[in-house]
Image: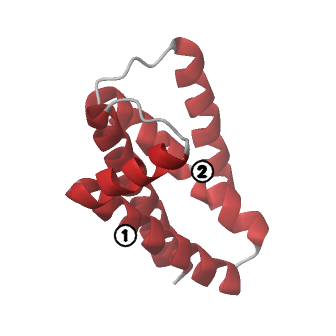
Amino acid sequence: MKWVLLLLMISATIASDVLQSHEMKRAGAQSVGARGLVRLLKLIAARKFLVLAVACMAVSFFSFMALVQTEPLSFAVPASAASFIFETLLARYALKETITPRRAAGTLIVMFGVILLGGS
């Protein structure tokens, strides 16, 4: 069950982050003042992918809560870092972001850490 919860949490996190990034880049810069917050909430409500991103975020949160009920936090948090690996790949290929060699190296280090953790 822990692997199902972990996969659900990671998948939902990835979907949420990629959808948010995609939609917010399309929306452009938003101010954060009182009026900006109202405008941002209206923007979120009007964009279906942002609403979906929030739903994915909720799935990720509740999956994490279920995971830490049955598994140690020392497993759940580092294992969730697998989302960084896939998000970096999606940022590069789906969102067309530039991934510097330093960022790629950091992602590889995280990947090896997740692999080491999975063996325990």
Q: SS for tag 2?
A: loop
The kind of residue on which mark 1 rests is Ala
Q: Is residue 20 above or below residue 16?
A: above
Could you say where residue 71 lies in the image, as x and y percent from the top left?
70, 79
Q: Name the residue nearer the viewer: 59 or 105.
A: 59
In the picture, the quarter occupied by the C terminus is bottom right
Q: Name the residue nearer the viewer: 19 or 36.
A: 36
- Residue at image x 45%, y 19%? 99
For residue 44, the mark is none
Is disc 1 surrounded by few (<14), some (14 to 19) or many (20+) residues within 10 Å? some
Query: Which quadrant holds residue 74?
Result: bottom right
Query: Which quadrant holds residue 112?
Result: top right
Horizontal arrangement in the rendering, residue 28 relative to residue 13 (left or right): left
Whether residue 73 can be seen here: yes
Horizontal arrangement in the rendering, residue 1 relative to residue 69 (left or right): left
Q: Is residue 41 above or below residue 65?
A: above
Horizontal arrangement in the rendering, residue 26 relative to residue 10 (left or right): left
Provide the residue designation for mark 2. 81
Provide the residue designation for mark 1. 55
